[in-house]
Structures are given as structure tokens and as C-alpha cells.
Image (spheres, coloured by chain):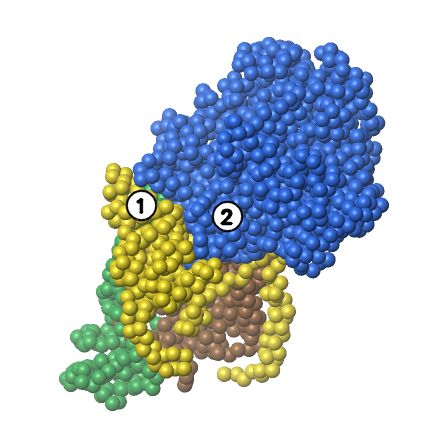
Amino acid sequence: MRRTTTTPWTALGLLVAVTGAAGCPDASVYPGDDVFQREPHSLFPEWPAAFDPAAKDWQLGSGMVDGRGLEQPIAFPHYTHVTLNGMQCEYCHQAARKSLHAGVPQGQTCMNCHTYVKKDSPEVQKVVAYFEKGEPVPWRKVHDLPDFVHFEHKRHVQAGVDCTECHGQMGLQGQPETWSEKDEHGKVVTKTGVRHPVVRETTLQMGWCLDCHASHPSVDENYGDKANLRRAELKDCWTCHK
Amino acid sequence: MSAAASRPVGTRVKGIYAHLDSFLAGVERLKSEGLTHFEVLTPLPRHEILEAVYEGRPSPVRWWTLTGGVCGITTGFLLTSLTAIQWPMINPGGKDVVALPPYAVIMFECTILFGALATLVGLLVHCGLPGFWLDSSLKDPRVSDDKFGIVFLRASESDAPKIEAALRESGAIEVTSGDDTVYEVSNV
Amino acid sequence: MNLHRRDFLKALGLSSGTSAIGACGIDANRYMTPVENVLPYVVKPDQVTPGTPTFFATSVLRGPHAHAATARHRDGRVINVGHNPMAPGRPSVSTSELMELQKHYSPDRLQAPQADGAATTWEAGLSTLATAVREARAAGKQVAYLGAYRSGALVELIDQVTEGHAVYWEPTGYEAEVAAAEALFGRRTLPFYDLGDADYILSFGAPFLGSWGDAAIEDRYALARDPNHGHGIVRFALVAPFRDQTGVNSDDWLACAPGSEVLVARALAARIASDKGVALVGQLAGGVTLEAAAEASGLSVEDLEGLVAHLTHGQAVVLPGGASGDADLAAATYLLNLALGAAPGRFHLGGYAGPVSGWSELSALLADCKAGKVGVLIVDEANPVYALPDAAGAAEALKAVGLVVGVSSHTDETTALASLLLPTSDAFEDWGDEQPVAGLRLLRQPAASPLYDTRSLGDVLLATARAAGLQAPEGSLGFAAPTWREYLAAVWARDLHQPAVDGAFGDFWEKSVIQGFWQGDAGDVTPALVAESYAWADAAPVAGDLVLLTHAHPLRKDGRYANQPWAQEVGDALTGMTWDSWLEVSHETAEALGLAPTGKQQRSGEFPKVSVTTDGGTVELPLRTRRGIKAGIAVLALGNGHVAAGRYADGYGVNAAKLFALAAGSLGAFAWRGQSAKVGDTGTLVKVATTYSNYDDTDQGRQFGMLVDAGRLAEHGDAPAAHAGELTGIHHLELDSRLAERDVEGFYTTPDHSTYRFGMTVDTNACTGCGACLVACYAENNLPVVGKGKLAEGREMAWIRLDRFWETAPDGTEQMAFVPMMCQHCGHAGCENVCPVLATYHNIDGLNAMVYNRCVGTRYCSNACPFSVRRFNYHTYHWPEPFNLQLNPDVSVRTVGVMEKCTFCVQRIRQVKSAAKDGGNFTATVPDEAWRQVPACAEACPTQAMTFGNLNDPEGACSQSRKSGRTYEPLADIRPLSAVNYLARATFHGDPTAHHGGGHGGGHEAAGEHAATHEGGSHEAPAHEGEAHEAEGHEMKDHHEAGSAH
Amino acid sequence: MHDTIDPNRPASYAAANRDIIRVLLQPNLGWLALFLTATAAMIYGGYCWYLQLTWGLGLGGYNPPIMWGIYIVTFVFWVGIGHAGTLISAILFLVRSRWRTGVYRASEAMTVFAVMTALLFPVLHLGRAWQVYWFFPYPNQRYLWMNFKSPLMWDVFAISTYFTVSAVFFFIGLVPDLAIVRDHSKGLVQKVYSVLALGWRGTGRQWHHYMAAYGFFAALAAPLVLSVHSVVSWDFAMAITPGWHSTIFPPYFVAGAIFSGCAMVITLLLPMTYAFGWKDYVNLWHFEQLAKMCLLTSGILTYAYGMEYFIGWYSQNPYEWAIFSWRATGEDYAWAFWVMVTCNCIIPLVWYFRPLRTNPVSLFVVSLFVNVGMWFERFNIVVSSLAHNFNPATWSYYWPSEIEWGIMIGSFGWFFFWFMLFLQVLPAVAIAEIKEMIAPPVRGAVEAK
């Protein structure tokens, strides 16, 4: 192969690169003069969280059955309330039959009982503290649908879909258990109590929703001879997408 | 074929030609003597060579093409209609759920795509490509230049002299035989 | 309502997750998803269920602008405003209510008291105010109030605190009308024009379909315009130098010289009074002859004779002038109404009776200020520093005041001069009442907790009065009420509560709060002349080669809504211009100036920049040509060019007010009289932001807009015609029947919808171009505001495009057809076929569905849409806080790269369908009546031009309208099977003399008779009508030609 | 029986090998300049795309209702360019056209790179390019599939099939030549080429199946020449937009594609053959055939242009007639229309004169005009139709933004990057096939000498 002198080519390349760069549109001009500011798009918004298991503001997406749940401000045991004491879901989640949201109980609902019951429990005392400060308990969402989903609790509850069909056996969640974990000093300590207050037992994914929408027996019960029409409607994108 | 154990009993005989006419003469002579278990080497697919060697036998690659095409058109039809039937209520523009005119395009493209890919597979299978493990006597860099060759991979003890004679007499510029003396190139 | 600020924020937390993050950005289908909090109420208010809207009856606007409205409350915040279905009349609201909604969430709101530019506390602020009031009183100085129009209990309180030194002034207000009413009838009251029964409207430029923002009159106009209301369509004539958004709705336009309107009105009044022998009116009108008026106005005597014929022919109403009309014009129109016998049925004094101060009072206050006679000036949303020409010296006057207190939710040019700013709660956070017309009292209740540390103006005044030790007059309620709400209740108990009828006051109050209004006897509203003479000012038309006229912008009004992004972003009805001021002239005038822009310049949004010079100064702005402007007239709207009104107002456009001379008109009423102006070329092109690039303003004969003959409609109205669309001649059913005749199937079958096939009817005859549907759509569907720069690049996001087309009637007149164009939800939609990922498809209810988060952004659907109604998200937009609180949680916030379009407000459809199932009947079909105003646009339309419904119900409103003679579907010839049909605009081109009161000759009928006469009037006598005016017909044609600038 | 290329200069098989392989891996000044320029343009386009991905398509000049701009224009342009290569390599193979041999390898390379370039645009013109995988059928938990009724879906299948088949065809054609290069190189280079050559040894068995498969590839690729650009034309013709919704589009597009492709072959190969001194293998005779092909397709195009107008007038469809008359006379884009007519219909007419179609300068210059004209043809179709659609209220004006120009320039950079690379690493003339054009070594001839 013939030898070529590299110097002119290097110079040429640099020239092309420099003139190209000089003519380049400048990224900094693009936020623009908008009234509502434009936002840049991030292709992988979850990357930082995905590489940092300690990222507390992130959880596994709804594709995953999340076995660990999220740390909650209060280790609330559904087990104690539902299974041991026989409370109905709708005592606390009052709006489930009449609104889009089932509703997380207002502080007053907790205080209906806990003004008298188990006042000495440290977890209950946290509830009382929130109530007395007039602050809401900052629960963290475990059953979180994407923001483009229109979900109506009332349609499902009224149709006779049982809460457990989507939320799993909530009544068995929050049972006391004993486990070991490292504290902040790296020392292994043994803890007893409610480890996972709320766990997501279903995927909450589109295909999972569709499985039910295609086959749930309540459609036949409620719609009779219009059941096929309703099933078609239940597969319509705009039934759930907004 | 590369393992010694699988080598056939017999010896290799290889003749290299510089000229097409003598090469063809060699092929004809060998054929006339009933020595047909040879492989030719040629820098270009001149049809008189392939005619002389294969005598019009068609390549089975065509069956691959046909099978691929049939699979493609079927796949195209099934893909389009089954996915549409899954969402019968979603009906863009008032067209039928299974609307053949638009699906015909997909079916056509699938036919071509599958046909081409199957042909590729057929080509590789029948040509023995990748051919890195071809017998070393078939690896001759002169062939890609301008030489022709006739190679017997396993000539029997009795045939070998006849073959060598035929090659020489038809005008081969080089005739080699025996397992160790066959020209072998260093490249892969 | 006992919502506390705290509750609000809690509720906010509950729902913010549903809208804060866009539909297509981070979503829970990804591997990792951000954790959202779910915050419960600490103590949940009874009325509120999270996830379900609550409606609070209220009144958002003030004074004469007020309407009965409902605030749609969702999870602690108000997300939309709509009409109050319980209120009397056909209910509706105007764009202003929606502007107030956005103002509520404006980031420019005052959030805490400020003293001399520094934050302070309420205690300190109130104490400063009380001290200043006490000292002013001690020093014998005035404690004055300067505000926009206010009515109801607050006025009483203000008057007591200021001892009557209160000025209620608006730059394009009603002072001329009120002054004229006082001069003629002895009552400072706005007249009420009942157009519902009229069959002829003569307007001298009153923006009654535009910047008046008066939903009641628009509603009555729509009724008169409705072919089905018993008699024919009202004919609307305009005598004005240019047609504004109201004026383009007119059937006849007589382009008069600016300033000559009063002579025309007086001449008509004198002539008709003498014809009818109404001596007093004739005497008051003075001896102006038609000839004199014709000479001054540039109209022909025949034109005026024609007007006389029309006016005397049926039930006519005369409306006053626009912003440039002074009290003389108002008085002349009153006299004309009296001469016509329109009082008291169609013209009476039952309008707004609250305080309307004139320029004389305002200038007196400013003079007092300058003279140091004012110790404390309380400024409440009046903005004289911006709105008055500089010669008024408003800023200097304010500087001479001891303490200027701004009590407002926002700062503007005037409150910027205030040393103390006390942020007041706005209409969504406050109690109050209004009395827009006689006999109707609207009650305002808070629909949400205050967003910031604001207080009610009533509370401020009460606290100040108490702290300053003011004495209320004897017999008044005094200042003892601990809160403004209790003061208000006391006023209602005193004035409105009748124990014998209403029972206990508690029940009466609760009922009033729930329904939002009180209705009672209007009293005697007959206009009785008390004047025996009237001093007409010299009414010479404005001289000059080019006369500059102004008017209040239909959306930004006099500038009060200039800081609302919606008011800036929604295109002007006539030009599509946004975020700017622009000079409008006719194409001929532009050519004469050598400035006519080329089509390509206009399509690419580049307009010649011109300078406009008057005695008041010079401004530079783009020049836009349009039809409907007399030669030699230039029009520049008020409302833009702010310097200190907030981030969305400052620096956009120019302030037209500063170009005008400070000229009090007759009776001391301020008028924006025309100014002689010079227009010069700056030699540059300027890129403008416009939503409309069709500068030809016609539909090229493609029948997007259609005119039909009102005469033919008179016989049947919209009752099913011989065949659908027989008047327009285009309707897809016709095509279908032709196919059926030839036994041809369409290539594709008509889609089958088993329960619902939603559709809409848009009556272009009722559409006035006000833009309420667009604004309501912005509010309901989370449409981002892209701003001037991006709009100039064609990035607007409005789901409804207000297409407007000049259609030429057979007699050569030009008629505007407004065609609100939204997704037509075609049965054979071009967009659906082409989407590669099925993001758009036809759903089971006949809706053209669009799934945003399935969209990949090929934009193919938009290319394939023959109506070009799809919008593309070119960017992800961020709602500046707290605008995000107004976001509708039922609608996705779209992110970059997805297509979107009108959904017929599918979230509301879902809500109605879901609510119907709440009773347990899952299979019931919601009846058609329940659908009519479900989409936000249909709800907001003040003229009810939009009707939504189920086309599967053959008796439904939309199905019926599709059988009307004037139904048409744009592009029916390409057979999209639209779900939207339009009803053609009716005009009188078939018979230039006709209008439909006419069967009974001279029009001498007394008030009250009209109901009976209309029964048969137009049905029996069309032949008579035709004959009687055949001779005049030709003459009338002439004036149309002369009158049109084109 | 078999002609040599130039009877006056007896070539040999070995000379052919030597001549073609000689230029490989020899970057000279001109090559480097072009290559670096192309690379710089490519990087510039990539940067523009990065900005567009970050900020959204608002950085383009789109102005509703003109929602497609020069991305689609350039997409169609490149797809069209590709067609000439397939035409030459497949259809001319099937019809045993002799002039194909010298030019088909470079044309085919041009096809593959043009399709690679074209493939960029459907991705980068997307509002959400990161969701492009939704275009492909893959089973997913959502049970979602695509709309096979959409012309864009046809396009996805057509273009990806076209790319796959062209690339396979190209590579298979290369294998014997790669073996030649392998046998003429040493060391690491030889190792690389021997892997690429797949162990090709020129045995009779290999040639036998190879020739059969090659024929099948050609037979499969031949309908693609017609179908791919037909499908691309349906992207337009299937939408009801006036100016697009026309049955003439498929043949019109195919003719245009071949026209532009042949012109591009002239543009690319003429300098190549002079630079490499390959007059023995690719010479004016080949280019004359290409020019004749251009003349034919130019005539078809001219007819199609005229027929569009005729149909617009004869159908009395007001929307059609409005767009066509506006396209030629409107002040916005009439200049683009006349650029198209001049470059596509008028300038190529000079090739009717034999001296001008056998003159390298005239061939090169006219082919450049054709390239420009064909780009403008697509610009006219895409932009001016959208700018003047059904609803006069929306008529608007589009001009590309700097980002769009940047990406378009980047696409040319991307194409030439690959093409220049190809010239250096792969034999640009099909050596094994060119040998068929050379008189074979015959003993009789040697002895006679």
C-alpha cells in the first residue's frame, strides 16, 4: 500500500470539523421564548434509579409483581384490621363504590377507633401525631397505575369485582414477622413487626387488565344479552386510556 | 471432512489447467473414462463448465425458495388476519376486520422476504458455506486468479494412475497426487 | 364550604399524581417508576369525594358582566366553569368566566400583602390602612375608591367606607349609555335589549356579541336567530365604519363615516317619530333630515329610506354604538327605539342598575388627587394608568395621594404605583353577590380555598372601618359584622328575604347558596321620557385621510384579561392573530398605502410592519388586511401593550389607548372617538403569530361555509325538509341515496354502532365567533399554551379551529360564516386507516378515538385528515405553577411527539355513562337530552350553536337536525361520513327587503301583542311582503354594493 | 463467442483481478477529502438529530397542515435512488443484458447504502423515535399489534424486505470476489477477507448452487423494483389528500425511481471509473446505456406529469385541479415545480444527441441536474400537496428549518461515508463476472502466438 502523508489529512479533518461545529445549531437556544416552557426529553429517565437500588423515590414498574412493597410512614397491618378484626374494606376506603378513587381513609377515620383502641402502640401514636398536627399521612402508592389510565373503582366494585381480584389477599398482608437486617452501622439486628405493610401481588399491566375484561363472569351477570357488546366495549382503548 | 478419521479411503489427485479448452478436454476425457467423482475448480462460472460437469441437473436450491415463499405468504396472511381478529371492535376507517386488499401487500412482502432468506439458507447448505473446512486440496488461490482445476478427493489406488494420465494428457500444467503433496495454501 | 387551605393542599396531593407527569413520558410500565404519594384528607369535607367533581353554583364576573355559573370542583381545586342550569333563561357563560378561571391560577397573583414593595403581614397592612383612613378623615381628606364595576352588597359597604367617594369606571364601559338614560329617562340604568322577540336589529356598532360579554343578550340574539322559534330569523343591520366580531354577524352593513352614526340615528328617529306622530321623540331628536344624515355619513338617502322601511316594518330593536360611540349616539338610539315602539317589550330599563361612573367623575377624582384632597385611594381592579391616554395624568394624580392601596388579586400599571398592596381573594375564593339585571341577584360562594394568603375585599373594608373607627350612616348595617360573609347574609336578610314566602332565613340562605341566585320582581322598567330637550353636541365626522378607530378586544376586553395566556393564545376571530396588536385595514386601503402584503408573505406569517402616528404618539405594529372595513379606516384593538400587568401581558402588542386624544364626549361620557392618523411603512416585515393562514378568507367555493335563504327557512324552520340539505344541496345522505338508486355499495360498509353514535350539530347561523368554545376546550382538555414565538411557527394546540369564511350572497353582499372546525369523528376516517400502530381508530360509540400513549408520531393521520383538525405535540410543555392546578385530572397531559385532537370530551362522556350505571342499571341508554351540552365547547357556547347527541336516537336533536333543509357536511363529496353536521347560515340574499316580522304592515303593534301576531305573521303573508317591497329591492341592492368595502 | 471488453487490448483474468484489486485500501488525497467531508456531514446530522430528539420535532419547519417535510422528501429520494441498483443487478441479470456486468456491483452497493440512508428517515421523522420498535410485530403482554391496513405498515415491510434482500443479494454477489481479494492479500487483511469470503473456493459444486441461487435472488429482487416504490407511492396515494390520491402514483414513482437511480449511478460511477482508471471495465458505453435508460424514464415521467394535470382537469375534481394549477402557478412553490420540470423533463433531452450522451462532462452535469430535479419532484409531491389541501382555511407555508437541513445533509454524509468506504474495501466491479466478458485463456490462442 502506498504511503500517504498524514499531515494534510489531519488538517483537512480539523478544518471540516471546525467549520461544521461553527455552523452547528446551539442547543442552548432551544428552551426558547415559550409561555409554557418546553421540557427536554429524556430517553431513559429511570436509569439513575435502575442503577441505584437505594433510590427511595422509585419502585419497580407495574410490570413486576412487587414482593417487597414500599417502606410506609406507618407500618399499617391490613391483617390485624381485616382478618383479625373483621373490618370491611369500604369502612376505610369509603369511596370505592362511588368514585374513581377508592380513597385512602381520612385521618378522622383512624381516630374513630384509635381514640380508644391501642393508644399505646408506637405505630398508632404516629397516626395520632399526624392527626394532631393536621397533616396527612404521606402514604406511598403501591398500586399505581400509569397516568394515562382512566380507572374507575366504582365501576368494578359495583359490577361485583372483588377487591382481592386486583389487590390480592390484602387481608393477609402485614402479618407480624421477624427478620434480620443491617442497621445504619452495618450491624445485623433482628427486628419483629410488620415488615411489608402493603405488597403488590398483581402486575397491573394492560394484558392483565384485558384478561379480566375479556372473560370476567360479572359481565354476563350484569349485562345479560348485551354482554357481548359490553365485552367489546371493555376492549375499547378509550375504556381505560384517557 | 477436516478430521483425518473421516477421510475416505483413497488418494487425492489434482490437476491444474491454465487454459479453458484443455480443462474442458480433461473433464470430457475423465467423463468418457467413467471417472466422474471429481470436483472442478474454476475462477468463473462459465456455463460450458457447469454444463460439462452437471449436465443440466437443476440445483435443489429452488425448493428452498419455493418453501420460503409459501411460508411467507402464509405467515403474511396469518399475521395480518389473526392480529386483526384479536381486536375486532377496533376498526379503522370502516374497513373489514380481515381486509384482503391491504393485507395482500404484507403477504407479498413476506413472500419475498421469506423466499429470499430461505434461498440464502439453501445456498449456504448446498454450497457447504461457510467453507472453511473444505478439504485442503480444494483450497487453491490460483483458482481465484485464472487457473482451472480438477480434483479427485478419494481416487482409488487403481484409478489414480489413469486419472493422472488423463490430466496430464489433456494439458494440465501441474498434476499432483498423494495426501501430503497436494498443494495446500496457508490461508484459512 | 369549610375548606381550609390545608385541606386544599392535601387534596392536591391526592390528585396531583394523576396529571403532573405526562401521559407518555415516565410511566409505570417502565422498569422503574417514580413513587407517588397518596395523601388523604385529615378531615374530609362533606361535599367532596376524591375523584368525583362537585359543582358549586356561583357567579364569577362582577357588575353588569355577571352570569349565573357553576364551578366544577375536583379534588380541592376548580378546574372549569360552566353554566348554571338552575338559573332562569337559557343559561350560558362567556369567555370571561374562563379567563377568570385562568386568572385564579395565574403565577402573577399577589400572594401576600406588600408595603412599598416589601412583603408584610396582614396585621401590619391593615393597620397601615386603618391609620391612613383615620388620619385622612381627621385631616378632612377623602377616602376614595376607584374600581371596576361592582354591584350588590359590596357597593353598599364601599360607599359607606368612602362616604360616597367611589368611582366605578371601565374604559370601554357603559357610561355613555347610562348617561344618556339619565338624561332622557332620569335613571342611571343600562337599558335592556330583549332581542329574543325582535325581527330586525339595527346596531350602530355595539359589540353585543363580543366584548360586552353579555351571555344574556347573546342568548336572546341566538333565539331570535333560530329559525325554529316561531317566526323567521332576525335580520341584523349594522351602521358603522367597520365590522368587528359582532358586526360580521350582520346581514346588512352600511359603512358610514366615523362619527356620523349619531346623525343617522337622529335622522331615523326624527323621521320615524314624525311618521308615527310620536311628537316628543321627534322634538328630542331635533330636526335632522335623512338628507343631512346621508351627506354626513356618506350613505345614500335610499339606504336610509330602506332602513326606515325595515325599522317600521316589524319588531325592530336599535342597539347603541361601540367604543367610539358617545352618549349622544346612545340617546339617539334610545329615541329611535321609543319612536319604533320597542319599549317596553324589547327595550326597557331593566338592565344593570349598579353604579357606573362617568369620565366626569373619574376626572374629578383625578383632579382631587392632584389637588391633594385625597388621603387614601383604594384601587380595586381599575387600571386608569394603562387605560387612559397619558394626557389624563392618572399616574401623576396617584402619586399625589397620601396612601394608594391596591386591593386586587394582581398587580397592574395602576397598582404598581400603590404603596400598599392587599391581595384579595378572587371570585372562586370569595363570597359576594351581583345584580346584573333588575330582579335577579346572583350569589357567589367560594368554590375552593384561597390559594394564597388573601382576604376578601369585604373583610378588608370591614376590618379597616372598625379599626379606623368609622361611623356608618344611621339605619345602615354598620361595620359590626365580624366577617364579610355575615355582612352579605345580613344584606340578603334585609333586602331579599321575605319570611312569609321563604320561611326561616337559614333555609332561604341555604337554598340561595345551593342554587346561586335569587329571582324577584324587576319593578317598573318602562322607559319614560322625562327630558323635554336634549343638547346634542356638534357631531361632525372625524376628518382625516385615514381615521383610526378602536374597540375592546373580544377576549382581552379592555386589557383586563391580557395577562391570561388563553386570551393571548386563542386567535382573534377575524384575523387569527395572537399575542400581538395589529392594524387592520381593508385591502384597498393597504394598496393605496402601497403596503398590501403578498399571499406568500401572509402564509408564511410575515406582515409589513407599519408605523401609526396620531397626536397621541407613534407605534409600530404589523398590518393585517381584511374585509369589512371601510376605505380610509384603520382599526386597532385595545387590550394589549401592557408594561406592568404580568409576564403574559407585558411587551405584547401596543397600547392603543395611548394613541387617542383625551376627549370627553357629550354628557361627560368618555368615548374613543376616531383619530386622524398617518400610517407609514417601516420597510420591514415582521413575523406574526397567527392561527390562521388563509388570508383570502374564503373557502374557494368548497362549501365549508354555506349561506341559505332566510326567506325559505321562514316557512319551515328546521323542521324536516323535503329532503335533508335541500337548501344547501350538499349532504352525504344525498350521496348515499344516489348510490342506493344505482344499487352501488360503498367500497366500505357503514360502521355499525349498537348503542351510541355520538355526533354534533353546529349551527353556523348561531355561531358569533366569540371563541368561548376554544377557550373552554383549552380549559377542559389540558391544552398547552405555546406562546408567541412557537405560535408563529405554527405550533398552536387548539383542538377547535374557528374557520371563518366570507361567502358572497347572490346579491353580492359578503357574509361571514364562522365554522368551528373540530374533529369530525368521520365514519370513514382518513386518519384511521393510515396510522401504523392503531393509535387512532373508530370506537364502538362512533368516536374517532386517539390513544396518546400508543402514538409514535408519524403525523400521517394529520396529513390524511381532510379537515386538518389534528394537532401535534411538537414539544413537551411545562405548566408553570400554579397553572398545573387547573389541569383536568381526567385528561392526559400529552408529551412530545404525539398527535392529539378533539375527543368530544370523552372524559365527560365516560362520566355520564358511568354515572348512569351508578343506580345499578347497567344496560340503560342515556337519553339524548342528557347529552346535548356534555362536551365543554357545547357547554360554553353562549348561543348554543353546538348540540351534542346520539345519532342512533332517531328523535335526538342531532338526528333531527340532519334532516333539516340547511344541514350540510363539509367535504361530503369525499364521503367521510362525518359525525358533525353544520347548519348553514341564513341570510336575506333572496329578498333584500325581507325580514320576518313583516306580515302586518306598518309595525304599529303595541308591546305585548307580538306573541300573538307572530303566530301567523310570516306564514300567511309572504306574498304580500314580497310585493310590497319589490320596488325597493333594487335600491336596497345598491346600498349593499356601496356599503361593502369590496 | 464472448467479447472482450476492448478487443484492441486483450485483457486476461489475472489482469482483471489486478486492475480491480489494485485500488483497494489505497486512500489517496481525493478519497480522503471526500470521506472526511462525508464523515463531518454525518456527525453534523447526528448532532441535529440529537437536538431534535431532545427538544421535539418543533425544531423542524412543520407548519400545519404540512406535517411532512424534507425528511419524507429525502426518504423517498433515497429509496428511489436505490431502485436503479436493483434494476441493474436483478432485472438486467434476468434479461441477460451485457452492459450490466461492469456497473452492477457499484450500483448495488449504492442501492444498499441508499436504502440504509432511506431507513434513517422513517425513524428520525417520528415524533417519538424511541418507540420505533412498535412498528414491528412482536408478541407482547399488551396483546397489541400494528395496523396492517396502514400504508406505513406496508412501507415498513416493503423497505425492510427490500433492505434485507438487497443486502443479501449484494453480499452473495460479493463472495467470489472477496475470495479473490483474500487470495491476493496477506496477514491480517487476508484473515478479515477470508472470513468475509465464507471459505469460497470456486468449486464446481459451489458455482452450481450459487448460480441457481443467484438467479432466484434476482427473480425475487426483480418484483421488488416495482413493488417497493409502489408501496412508497401508496404512502401518498392511499391518503385522500388532493395531489396524492391518484392511481398513477405507483408507475409514476417507479419510473421516477429508476430515473433518479440511473442518474445517481452515472454521478457516482463516472468519477469512480476515471479515478480508478477502469476504462477497460466501465466505460462510456455503459454510461450511454444508463443515459438511454434515463431518457426512457424521463419520458415516462414527463408523461406522468402531464397526465396528472390532464386527470386533474378531466375529472373536474375541484380539489385536484386546485392543487395542480396552484403547484405550477402559486407564488409559494411554483419555482420548485419548474425546477423539477426543467431538471427532469427538459435538461435530459440533451442526451438524445449521441455526442452529448457519450461525453463524460455532459453525462455528469446532466445527471446532477436529474438528481436535483428528482429531489424537487418529491418536494413538490409532499410539501405542495399538503400546503394546499382540502380546507382553504389551513393553507400554509413550509420551509425547512436548519435542523432539517442539517439532518438532510447528514444523510448525504451517511451515504457517502459508506460509499467511499465501499470503494476502498470492496471490489467495486464484479471481478468474477467481468471475467465472463474476457476471452478465456485458450491453449490454441497461445500456441498460435
Residue C633 percent coordinates (x, y): 76, 35
Quadrant, the N terminus of chain D: bottom left
Q: Is residue D235 visible?
A: no
Instruction: Locate residue D388 relative to residue D79 in the image: left or right.
Output: right
| Residues at marks 1 and 2 on the same chain | no
| Colour given to chain C in the rendered image | blue
Examine the rendered structure and indicate whether residue C501 appears above or below residue C582. above
Q: Chain of mark 2?
A: C
- Give amino acid for label 2: Asn
Q: Which chain is yellow?
A: A
Image-quadrant location for residue A220: top left
Residue C202 percent coordinates (x, y): 67, 24
Question: Which residue is identified by label 2?
Answer: C2
Q: Which chain is green?
A: B
Examine the rendered structure and indicate whether residue C40 appears above or below residue C2. below
Instruction: Locate residue A27 relative to residue C735 in the image: left or right.
Output: right
Residue D170 percent coordinates (x, y): 39, 66
Q: Residue at x 69, y 36 (%)?
A: C474
Question: Which residue is identified by label 1?
Answer: A158
Image-quadrant location for residue C276: top right
- Give amino acid for label 1: Gln
**Viewer-proximal residue among C496 and D265:** C496
Q: Residue at x 57, y 11 (%)?
A: C1021
Q: Residue at x 55, y 26 (%)?
A: C223
Q: Residue placed farthest to the left in the image? A: B158
Residue B21 percent coordinates (x, y): 31, 74
| Colour given to chain D in the rendered image | brown
